[in-house]
Amino acid sequence: MSAKTQAAARGSQKAATKRRVSAKSAQAKPRKQVEDTTTHAPAAADTEIQEMAGEVRKRIEGIRLIKLIKKTLLERDLPERTIADIMGVTTIYWNSMANGNRKIKSLGKDKLEKVADFLEIPTIQVYILADYFGPEDFFNVKTLDDQMWLAMKKMAEDPQWSAYAPTREEWDRFPVKVKAGYAALYERAYGEVLMAKAQIEIPELLGSAQ
């Protein structure tokens, strides 16, 4: 093989080696990019979760009422000091409520009624929008024991049954079954007395009872 032929062969080998190295580098870069994206994905998710948690913490109590007031002011082309004057507070105080530093539900009834007049909605709606009520305000939270004790208090006030009514200390020591029996017996007897009185005062009930 001549010297020229050998040099040409060595040149071809070097070019092929360079092409293989370039191909490997091109294949390696996308993998690195994918790895970087995978590495940063959890961090981005954590940041989003932290932002959402921050929004929850910053939730302003009564924000629905505040938004409605601001919307009404905007629609009527009125400055925000208008609502402060209506409430009878300073503009600084109103801004403090709007920013969540004070609770708008802490305003007195007379002030909330003025807000209702301004918004042209019922006062009860203002209370609801101000988050004045909680879920517990819409339910009877008395327990069964409380309800049965009410029957015992009624028994203590009844001249015919007062001698049999237990004291509070005795009541608290009774098992639940004894309490239920006491309450049921008295309610039944009390109901029969009421029905007898009603039949005397309203004779028509006597026929319907039979």
Image (cartoon, helix red, strand yellow):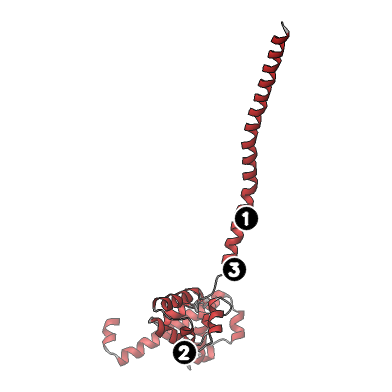
Q: Quadrant of the C terminus?
A: bottom left
Up-down: is 23 above or below 183?
above
In front: 35, or 180?
35
Horizontal arrangement in the rendering, residue 22 relative to residue 163 (left or right): right
Horizontal arrangement in the rendering, residue 29 relative to residue 156 (left or right): right
Mark 1, residue position: 46
Disc nearer the start of the sequence (1/3): 1
Up-down: is 66 above or below 108?
above
Gap in angstroms between the C-alphas marked 1 and 3: 16 Å
Residue 179 % position (x, y): 54, 78
Gap in angstroms between the C-alphas marked 2 and 3: 30 Å
In front: 210, or 39?
39
In front: 45, or 158?
45
Task: Report the amino acid beneath label 1.
Answer: Asp
For label 3, the crowd category at 10 Å Cα-Cα, with few meaning under 14, some 14 to 19 and many 20 or more, is: few
Task: Report the amino acid beneath label 2.
Answer: Asp
Q: Secondary structure at mark 3?
A: helix
Task: Report the amino acid beneath label 3.
Answer: Arg
